[in-house]
Image: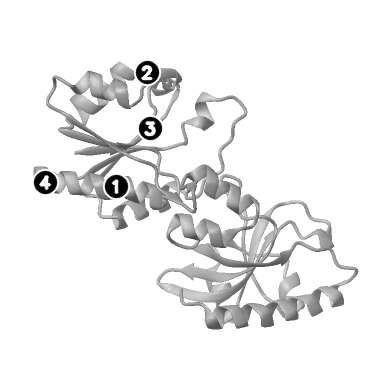
Amino acid sequence: MATIGFFDGVHLGHRTVIDRSRDVARLLGLPSLVVTFDIHPKSLVRENNEVLLLTTFEHKIELLSAAGVDIITFINFDPDFANMPAEKFCRDILQEKVKARAIVVGDDFRFGKDTRGDQELLRHFFQHRGVDIHIVSKLRIGGMEVSSSNIRKFLQEGDVERAALFLGRLPSARGIVEPGSKRGKNLGFPTINLRNLKEQQLPKNGVYAGYARYDSHRQKAMIYVGAKPTFDETERMIEAHLLDLPEQRENLYGRQAEILFLRRIRNEMKFENTEKLREQLEKDRRTILDILKCASI
């Protein structure tokens, strides 16, 4: 019993497909299997088409496991694979390697060279091979399709609340905590800093209420996404001021942290001087504490 896709974000639309595959697997007495890819197919098959991801590969695997998938396997999406004809994918991967007895995919699933494979080709190829094909219709919320591309659009607009609605959880970014310039500490707002996030779809630059998660801990956080225009810096990064135990930040250097975005507070701003910045940060802190005090997540 197999389902196939990139599953970036493992959003509610993906969960609908995965839940259907688990139901079919249970009826057949088979384990549920997800076949996914190590990189986004569009990043290879289309020139100059970098796709920013909603989840790192490791995070995606965690979410698929949490969704109750029994077996997860991934394919290296290299040029040879990208040029594999759709019929060969059906034969070599689904029939011979996966040995699928049933296949569940979303109704927009495409595969094979030039994405020529679709649900009709799947049905035609397997109609006399004893493999049932199950097609799951798109999930819609408020009349809009739940898709990774729509969630990316929400994040680009800073609409983290709508992104959370489509994801079924708070949008987030993961990275390794690095020492910063200590400017936040000098202002009275020490932060943990995440850089090298170029492959992840971050929310629009600005200040957010949210959380920082590391190991099994979660702290309330005042989060900044941007490039610090007050100090004429250009690298886009995340800074998070831990509101519960800010002194723990130094214990996190070199460790992975996940930053979760609950609500956008304001746009990125450039200040005349550090005192003006400090005053605004204090206002932000009070606003965010009030928001998080009422949050049910």
User: Mark 1 sits on what residue?
Assistant: 18
Front residue of 103/182: it is 103
Q: Looking at the rendered structure, which numbered label has been put on residue 27?
A: 4
- The quarter of the displayed image where residue 90 is located: top left
**Taking the image as drawn, is residue 80 in sight?**
yes
> Where 86 sits versus 236, above or below?
above
Residue closest to the far front: 143
Residue visible at 13% across and 22% down? Answer: 129
- Mark 3 vs 1, N-terminal side: 1
Q: Which residue has dot 2 on it? A: 84
Other-residue count near label 1 (Cα within 10 Å), few / some / many at <14 / 14–19 / ≥20: many
Helix, strand or loop at mark 2: loop
Give the label, 2 or 1, closer to the camera.
1
Q: Earlier in the sequence, mark 2 or mark 3?
A: 2
Disc 2 residue type (three-letter): Met
| Marks 2,3: beta carbons within 8 A | no
Q: Identify the residue at horizontal 36%, vertical 22% (top origin).
A: 117
Q: CA distance from mark 1 to mark 4?
A: 14 Å
Within 10 Å of disc 3 (Cα), the crowding (few <14, some 14-19, many 20+) is some
Which tag, 3 or 4, sits closer to the chain's start? 4
186, above or below 21, in the image: below
Mark 3: amino acid = Phe
Query: How many neighbours does mark 4 have within 10 angstroms: few (below 14), some (14-19), or many (20 or more)?
Result: few
Q: Position of residue 184 (x, y in %)?
A: 72, 72
Tell me the SS state at disc 1: helix
Give SS at disc 3: loop
- Residue 268 sits in which quadrant? bottom right
Specify which label sits upstream in the sequence, 2 or 4: 4
Task: Check disc 4 and give the amino acid type.
Answer: Leu
| Tag of residue 109 | 3
Badge 2: residue crowd in 10 Å (few <14, some 14–19, many ≥20):
some
